[in-house]
Image: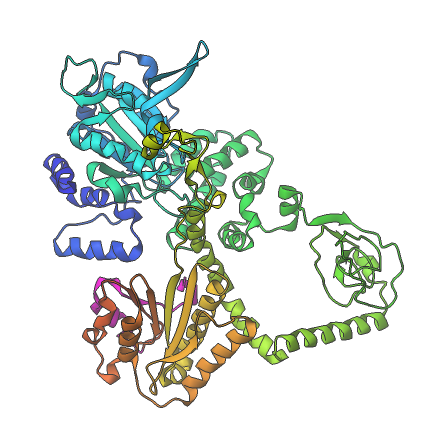
Amino acid sequence: RKMKHICRRVEQRPDELGKIVQNTLMMSFLPDRERRIVEKCLSRCRIELNDGEYTQACDYVLDEELLVSCRRTPLNPLLVPNPRFEENPGQAQVMGDILEAHSVGEKALLISGYQGVGKNRIVDFLLSILNCEREYLQLHRDTTIQSLTLTPSVEDGQIVYHDSPLVRAAKHGRILVLDEADKAPVYVVALLKGLIEDGQLSLPDGRILCYGDSSDPEVVSIHPDFRIWTLTNPAGFPFHGNDLAREMADVFSCHNVPPMNMESHKRILHSYGNNVQPHIIDKIIKIWEDLRVAHESGTISYPFSVRESVNVMKHLNTYPNDGVEDAVENVIAFDRLDKGLAKQLNGVFGRYGINILKEDAANKTFGRANQGGISTPKTRTSSPKYGKVDPDNTPHVGGNTWAGGTGGSDTAGLGGRGGPFRLDAGHPVHQISEKMKSEVSEEAQRRAREMAEEALEKKLKELDMGKLDWSRYNDLQTQVEDQIFQLKYHLKDLKKRSEERIWLKNQATGELDENRIVDAISGERDVFKRRGNPDEFNNDVLHSEPVTIKLVVDISASMYRFNGYDNRLQRLLEATLMMMEVFRDDRRFKLYITGHSGSSAKIPLVDPETDLDEVTQLRVLECMVANTQYTYAGDNTVEAISTVVAEATIEDLVIIISDANLERYQITADDLAPLQSHNIQAHLILIGSLGEEANDLTRSIPNERAQVCFQSSELP
């Protein structure tokens, strides 16, 4: 089916085979590994690909002959869209691609792109210059087959069903635009697959949509000009849509709407920013370009688009005295709630003099629920103490009695003076002035420091860690703090997907369950179904088993020997700590960690029963270092990979982290064949190399089952 779509297009544009194949296979939305595999296949077939779909010609114009050939005479001009649209070469190229597919008779188009890239504007503007009547239908998670085909309304106190936009478009030969199609249940949208493939669709009221004339009153003839244009976001995080492309992309002509290139972006922002100085517009464009790069590299997971930059420009155009920082607040206000994400964004905005982590900016945005204003202590400062524990956890401000109070004196808390250490009880923080802090005597300060040291020693003793241990662990954890955040943030998608609404069966109200019609006739009451959360009932819910992740780490002598050369042992420790931090409290995963050295192919380090607190994690890392220092020289990489793959079950994820010190042991890519297991996802990550050995080995291992990672920032 995909070959048919390609051939229809290539017949008209033989010089654009690479671009057509890219769109048809939706390569822009493939994971990096899969995309590189496809690119290698196409390269071997001598199909030239674009350098990047993001880079588009700056002088592209629509083919006037095609426009003329596709124009229609609308019977109802009110149904022809009339959007505000600033013409630009980037979106013009997307329109040209859609226009070419439309001109060769494609009955269904799948137009995909991230939220805010202009899918609706592109489609509406193209329909306006083609004079095409449009029927619009926005889908959502609660869309049903009935709502897709019939529209209920109340007339004279009775519910009357009318034709839906789908049926009206089919009858009158209009363009049906299905927006947010990825949000609807797949089985609902799959209804269209039969309509597109077979040219026939049975309606709930007994009528049949089909091509051709018929005298049967139950048959609704489909107009030959009827077309379906479906708009979707890519599946998965951060939009949490269904993978519509996987289920039925073969019946669509697929088109990608890429992020805006800089020239097109500039034209659009200028159209909204008549009162904004050009250098400000250029700054916004550069920031959004950096945000795009950060998203593509995986640093941030949300793809900031032209929609957000246009909102910034509208703000600056209306309130020119506010400045860029205030305008940006409208876009990133909620992102501040996630400290890790805010830190990543600050790295981008900070390069252009915009500090989004400033305290006053945060206060302005949220009113800072955890800031309680200025405090004046009610008592004089005396000697430090822990304070009493309030069993009701009532907020206490300005006093010197309760532990966890704020803006007071002598007790453990926040925002006050003279207390032994910080203690957050979760209340708004009231802050005293620096002048009041200076009133604390030197003797009281000395005693407070002593109490703090005693408390730290007690805490470390509870953790079974010395000061040196804690310092070493904390230093290592700080090195991968950002990477831990990135990986956790990307894994949020799995949690969101498990929380999606589902059909609740055996309900007393809702829609009639078509599978229980016989039960309804026999008098059963609970024959309805409705949309709801899985937690609302206990029947028919399948709790998926945790995903098993098996991490195999190289703790052979070469890791210790060459650590001074390229810090490979340091990266190995950082990677292992990152994995333990990310998965230790996540019940969706079961983590196993084993090591291999010259002495053994399997050294157990962590299993799902291991209580991964700070102490245990440090001990695991110390064990790894000790093995690299005292083990015999030798290599068991091949044996370790063979062992873990043989022990893994279907759908397990196996990750092997090693250096590329394999050539000296006559180990080649052929020896690593177990990586190519069909039932198990096994991947080799090389974090150290002498010369080009790692890159050469990676290129020789097929199916992108090997990666090179020489920077901790690339670990996630």
Closer-to-camera residue (683/611): 611
Q: Is residue 412 left or right of residue 24?
A: right
> How was the colour assigned to the protein in this rendering?
rainbow
Q: Which quadrant holds residue 147?
A: top left
Q: Is residue 244 visible?
A: yes
Tell me if 224 is positioned left or right of 459 in this view: left
Q: Residue at x 39, y 51 (%)?
A: 542
Residue closest to the far top: 156
User: Is-magenta flag for residue 638?
Assistant: no
In this rendering, the answer to whether 627 lies above or below 98 is: below
The image shows residue 347, relative to residue 173, as above or below, that is below
Question: Up-down: is 523 above or below 358?
Answer: above
Q: What percent of the width, then of the height, locates residue 247?
A: 26, 42
Q: Quadrant of the C terminus?
A: bottom left
Which one is in front, 684 or 386?
Answer: 386
The quadrant in which residue 208 appears is top left
Q: Locate residue 388, reporting x and y percent.
A: 81, 62
Across and down, in percent, residue 551 comes to: 38, 70
> Bounds of the magenta span?
690-716
Tell whether 308 sits left or right of 200. Answer: right
Q: Is residue 693 magenta?
A: yes
Q: Quadrant of the N terminus?
A: top left
Q: Is residue 564 left or right of residue 659?
A: right
Question: How many marks are shown on the rendered structure?
Answer: 0
Observer-nearest of 43 and 428: 428
The location of residue 213, given as percent across then percent down, is: 14, 16
Extreme-front residue of the structure: 522
Residue 692 visible in the current orientation: no
